[in-house]
Amino acid sequence: MNHWLLKDTLYLPEELNHKEVYGFVYLIENLTNGRKYIGKKFFWSSKIKQVNKKKKRYKVESDWKDYYGSSAELGAEIINIGKESFKRTILHLCKTKAECAYLELKEQIERNVLLSDEYYNAWIQVKVRKSHLKHLKK
């Protein structure tokens, strides 16, 4: 398995209380040609289960451990050359969904992912409210 790195060390989720973080912004690098992908992933997803005719929400862990982005082009290259040819790095651990969205967009814009052939990113989509980012203001 190709593990996630955080600050150039192996990311061990047991060291982190996942109730304090919502998700992360990541960089995937193709080690054979240098191309990259910036994205975000959440640690948990909400599911709804019907219990006694009532809807009950609960959280389940996402597929983040094995995740390699939503880019079709990147996915095809992973199938062709193998996961071991890619490096996965966590750039930011985020406390909220909005923080993940904002920091993903910030990384994508600063790196000009849509204007550079160096990146697999083909589109950017974000919806963030200023009020959701109060804790980031400094």
Image (spheres, helix red, strand yellow):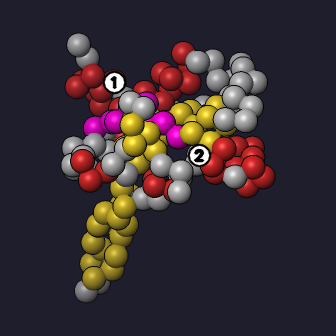
81 or 46, which is in the foreground? 81
**Residue type marked 2:** Gly
Checking the image for residue 59, the label placed there is none
- The residue under the point 48% across, 49% down is 3
- The residue under the point 37% across, 61% down is 61
Q: Looking at the picture, does residue 32 appear above or below residue 131?
A: below
**Residue type marked 1:** Lys
47 or 40, which is in the foreground? 40
119 or 79, which is in the foreground? 79
* Residue contact at pointers 1 and 2, CB within 8 angstroms: no
- Foreground: disc 1 or disc 2: 2
Q: Position of residue 55 (x, y in %)?
A: 30, 74
Among the two numbered marks 1 and 2 on one chain, the one whose residue lies closer to the N terminus: 2
- The residue under the point 27% across, 72% down is 56
66 or 120, which is in the foreground? 66
Q: Relative to 87, is 62 on the left or the right?
A: left
- The residue pinned by badge 2 equals 69
Is residue 105 a member of the stretch shown in magenta?
A: no
Spatial CA span between label 1 and label 2: 26 Å
Magenta-colored span: 88-95
For label 2, the SS is loop
- The residue pinned by badge 1 equals 130
| Residue at the outermost bottom position | 52
For label 1, the SS is helix
Specify the quadrant of the image occupied by residue 132: top left
Instruction: Identify the main secondary structure in magenta.
Output: strand
Which quadrant, please, contains the C terminus? top left
Q: Position of residue 58 (x, y in %)?
A: 29, 66
- The residue under the point 57% across, 39% down is 87
